[in-house]
Amino acid sequence: MSTKPVRIAVTGAAGQVSYALLYRIASGEMLGKDQPVILQLLELPNEKAQAALKGVMMELEDCAFPLLYGMEAHSDPTIAFKDTEYALLVGSRPRGPGMERTELLAANAQIFTAQGKALDAVASRNVKVLVVGNPANTNAWIAMQSAPSLPRENFTAMLRLDHNRALSQLAIRMGKPVSLIKYLAVWGNHGSTMYPDYRFASMEGESVKGIINDDAWYKDVFLPTVAKRGAAIIEARGQSSAGSAATAVIDHMRDWVMGTQGRWVTMGVPSNGEYGIPKNVVFGYPVTCSGGKYTVVEGLEFDEFSQDRIERTLAELISEQDAVKHLL
Ligand code: NAD
Ligand code: LMR
């Protein structure tokens, strides 16, 4: 076992996503069963949030995880992010029934400005950042713009939940295991304009689109089911997704760090102009990961329908950026 622990900062550590996440990080599901971790946990300074955080830490202690070398509770990001190599930015306000994620912009933008600045000031220069708090793409963009001394490519947003949702819907429709499906992509925003794209997907060498062979199902059932799944969960549970969100965090970070062995996964990453997306817009792309780095899958063709979907989701992202520019 490598004895040097890595520092992982998690914000919103007493919230419901973190409650489903922290135990899995501490058990080695994210970075491997031989990697010790120190958790640097950030919550709001108020008494209730700090007391709840204390309770979560007591439970983590009670698990006696062999890989959990240390835990810290913080209310100041400039201390919580000190030397951290991984920053999972979960803490922010979730949406309630009937709201769009974009409506959280005003409430959450300031959090990500302050946290971007704090990362810039004190985190490891190699810190890998995943923004989960909504609207995740634009919050990642805000944090990245607020951290000019860190590499842009270290800032990512979570679209893995959308990717996993799309995989499951296809697998259910075909009556096959999820693990057989390859080359799926979800383009753009983690918002209602996202574009889950099965045109390149294959199952045991055969085209998924060809197997399903039902364009009406794809457009009228699959696309809205995936894009509106977050709202459907809120409607059903009365709270936003937590277990599936935590699973997506684990998947996103594990694949970024340990590689995807040629599989495509979806990550929200700052554009370098791929597929005509303006530089720095944090956009969901199919990527492969190797050696701790991700690479956008390039050279894919777009038909008229796909081009239109890409433009719609880009327009949503640009309008979100425009709404918060004055805060930066
Ligand atoms: P929650 O309300 O249960 O927990 C959020 C926690 O963050 C609370 O404990 C709160 O005290 C804390 N917090 C708020 N502001 C903070 C700050 N400035 N610093 C540190 N902590 C702060 O919410 P949740 O259900 O855990 O969801 C958290 C966020 O994740 C929401 O924005 C939600 O919409 C988002 N989310 C995103 C995805 C995705 O796929 N990208 C999936 C699920 C949830
Ligand atoms: C989700 O997709 O489940 C989360 O982003 C929560 C939400 O607001 O939909």
Image (cartoon, grey):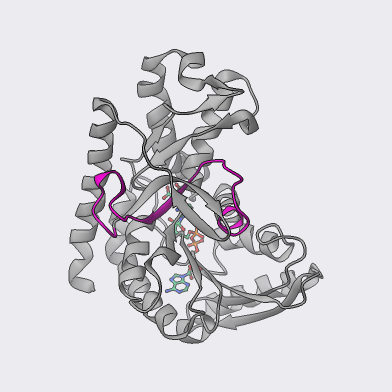
Q: How many marks?
A: 0
The residue sitting at 72% across, 60% down in the picture is 32
Magenta residues span: 253-280
Q: Is residue 15 left or right of residue 231?
A: right
From this view, report whether residue 313 is shown above or below residue 54. Answer: above
| 222 relative to 77, above or below | above
Does the stretch in magenta take in 262? yes
105 relative position to 155: left or right: left
If the image is split into quadrants, where does the N terminus sit? bottom right
- The residue that appears at 77% across and 70% down in the rendered structure is 67
Above-or-below relation of 37 to 165: below
| Residue 304 visible in the snapshot | yes
Horizontal side of 217 relative to 239 (left or right) equals left
- Where residue 120 appears, as percent x and y from the top left, is 40, 80
- Residue 319 percent across, percent down from the top left: 20, 53
Whether residue 228 is visible: no
**Where residue 196 appears, x then y in whole percent?**
40, 35
Which corner quadrant of the image does residue 309 belong to? top left
